[in-house]
Image (cartoon, rainbow, N blue to C red):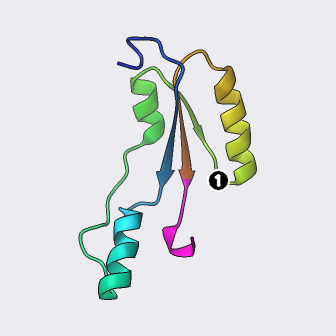
């Protein structure tokens, strides 16, 4: 729908390789977690398959740069950013 309507939207995906908030909650309550590990898709290929721009940022500075560039894009941009909920 986003591409069909030619919307300028920025999608931010926080990548942690598992259901991080659920994992953290389980560990706090039960001292361990279960069923929360996942394999992420290749987000670059996913973005390209829908005709979206793609950016990956490893640092806050890279994220800020990618986000600023996305604001100039006339279409949809997907930005991925790694996060570790265990350190939050």
Q: Is residue 42 magenta?
A: no
- Residue in the image at 54% along x and 18% along y: 75
Q: Residues within 10 Å of mark 1 (few under 14, many from 20)?
A: few
Q: Position of residue 73 (x, y in %)?
A: 63, 20
Residue drawn at 40 percent across, 23 percent down: 50
In the picture as drawn, the residue positioned furthest to the bottom comes out as 31
Residue 24 picture location, percent across and down: 40, 74
Which quarter of the rendered picture does the C terminus lie within? bottom right
Q: How many numbered discs, if any?
A: 1
Task: Give the side of residue 14 with respect to residue 39, left or right.
Answer: right
Q: What residue is shown at x 71% (from left), y 52% (from top)? A: 60
Task: Check disc 1 and report its element: helix, strand or loop.
Answer: loop
Q: Circle 1 sits on which residue?
A: 58
Task: Judge from the rendering whether residue 47 lies leftward or rightward of residue 32; answer left or right.
Answer: right
Front residue of 85/48: it is 85
Q: Is residue 79 above or below residue 87?
A: above
Q: Quadrant of the N terminus?
A: top left
**In which quarter of the view is residue 22 placed?**
bottom left
Q: Which image quarter: residue 49?
A: top left
Query: Where's residue 51, x and y in %?
Result: 45, 20
Looking at the rendering, which quadrant does residue 43 occupy?
Answer: top left
Residue 25 in the image: x percent, y percent?
36, 74
Region rendered in magenta:
82-88
Give the residue at the far top of this rendering: 5
Asked if residue 84 is among those painted magenta in the image, a careful observer would answer yes
Above or below for 23 versus 40: below
Q: Residue at x 32, y 66 (%)?
A: 37
């Amino acid at each position: 729908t986003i591409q069909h309507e030619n919307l300028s939207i920025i999608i931010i995906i926080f990548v942690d390789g598992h259901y991080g908030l659920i994992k953290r909650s389980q560990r706090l309550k039960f001292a361990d977690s279960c069923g929360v590990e996942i394999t992420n898709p290749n987000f670059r290929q996913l973005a390209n398959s829908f005709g979206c721009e793609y950016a990956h940022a490893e640092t806050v500075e890279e994220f800020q740069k990618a986000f600023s560039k996305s604001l100039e894009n006339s279409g949809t941009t997907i930005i991925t950013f790694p996060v570790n909920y265990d350190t939050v």
